[in-house]
Amino acid sequence: MLQFTGTGAAASKSYCDALAKAAQDALKPLADAQGIRISASDAQAWVRFGCGRTDSNSIAAISVCTDLLAAQASLLPRVLAAALPAVYDTLFPPAAGTSGAGNCTSYPAAAATYRLRASDTSALAGGKACFSAADYDCSKPRPAAGFPPDLTCSRDSPAGLFALRPSVQSTAVSIFASRYQAYCFGLQLASPAPNGSSSCTSNRIVNVALYLNSTLRSSLTSVILRGATDQRRVPTALGGVAAEDAWWLRPGGTRVVGNALWVRPLDWNADLTRDLVARSRAEVCLELRPGVALSDLCLGGVPGTCFVSLISSDTCCPVFSTALL
């Protein structure tokens, strides 16, 4: 059950449609990536069930745990940790680039009176809950708060042209006669297409930043770019910089290693990205040393999840979460 609760105005029933869309656009892809199948029609039906109820201040409820296998239910906490902030921001859009700091000042005034609570409906019927309840409101720092570092662009805008595939693929990439085992992050066009009022209006992705633990940077063997005419395996030694440090220095910034791996320059526009997606080539892949898992490197506070920023301009660097399968 995903409850939208609080002490806000009685007109809160007007949030029903927004909650239904958020369940489909934010919760569903993350759940699907973990093998928890939620259909779009189910998302609509779950919101309609109980929408507008006033008992316990419940505004709307989405059943997500009933009849799930135990193995699936164990994956729900990581899904919800990433999905609840996304759903909340759909209902209460924050000022661009200002949410996630652990305060409500960047949100509309009504946001401070509401919270999202995810819990198992079987507990209400006297059964055993299959996952621990989780809460989110605008006073809580979101996962990956502060990433990417030292930038003033919009990290929370949902309206950029580009999006990240909801799951990371572990696959063998063939380049000429050689094959490399790599973790691949897929880029794609946002659907539906954004409106023109967003701060993210650029037609291209300039850089990609991944929130990774720099103390383990020696585990990175190469970065593989799967582009239009070739697939390039780029070793970690670049431009005379020490091999372990080259990808961890922010473009145009100080020569200080931080917890972000910067893939640059990328410079894919929307038309090129659309073509690459159709050819299963719109990917940035990381080759790690044998025995090292990507989960060892990913930071952000959500187990089984990596956070990635798609940087389109000085004003646009939205952060996405992607699940490790």
Image (cartoon, rainbow, N blue to C red):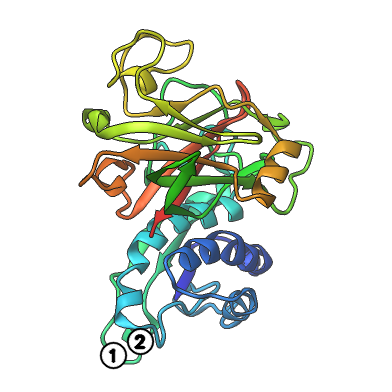
At horizontal 75% and vertical 48% (from top left) the residue drawn is 193
At horizontal 45% and vertical 77% (from top left) the residue drawn is 64
With respect to residue 59, does 94 lie above or below? above
Q: Secondary structure at mark 1?
A: loop
Q: Is residue 103 visible?
A: no
In-front residue for pair 105/29: 29
Residue 47 lies, in percent from the top left, at 59, 75
- How many marks the image carries: the answer is 2
Q: Amino acid at mark 1?
A: Gly
Q: Is residue 273 visible?
A: yes
Q: What is the quadrant of the N terminus in the image?
A: bottom left
Q: Quadrant of residue 246?
A: top left
For residue 127, the mark is 1
Q: Quadrant of residue 282?
A: top right
Neighbours of disc 2 within 10 Å: few (<14), some (14-19), many (20+): some
Q: Earlier in the sequence, mark 1 or mark 2?
A: 2
Question: Mark 1 and 2 residues: CB-CB less than 8 Å, in contact?
Answer: yes
Q: Amino acid at mark 2?
A: Ser
At horizontal 28% and vertical 40% (from top left) the residue drawn is 297
Q: Is residue 317 left or right of residue 198?
A: left
Residue 49 lies, in percent from the top left, at 58, 83
Residue 69 lies, in percent from the top left, at 35, 83
In-front residue for pair 289/310: 289
For residue 169, the mark is none
Residue 174 lies, in percent from the top left, at 47, 45
Q: Is residue 20 left or right of residue 212?
A: right
Q: Secondary structure at mark 2?
A: helix
In-front residue for pair 88/205: 205
With respect to residue 129, does 196 lie above or below? above
Q: CA distance from mark 1 to mark 2?
A: 5 Å
Q: Which residue is mark 2?
A: 122
Neighbours of disc 1 within 10 Å: few (<14), some (14-19), many (20+): few
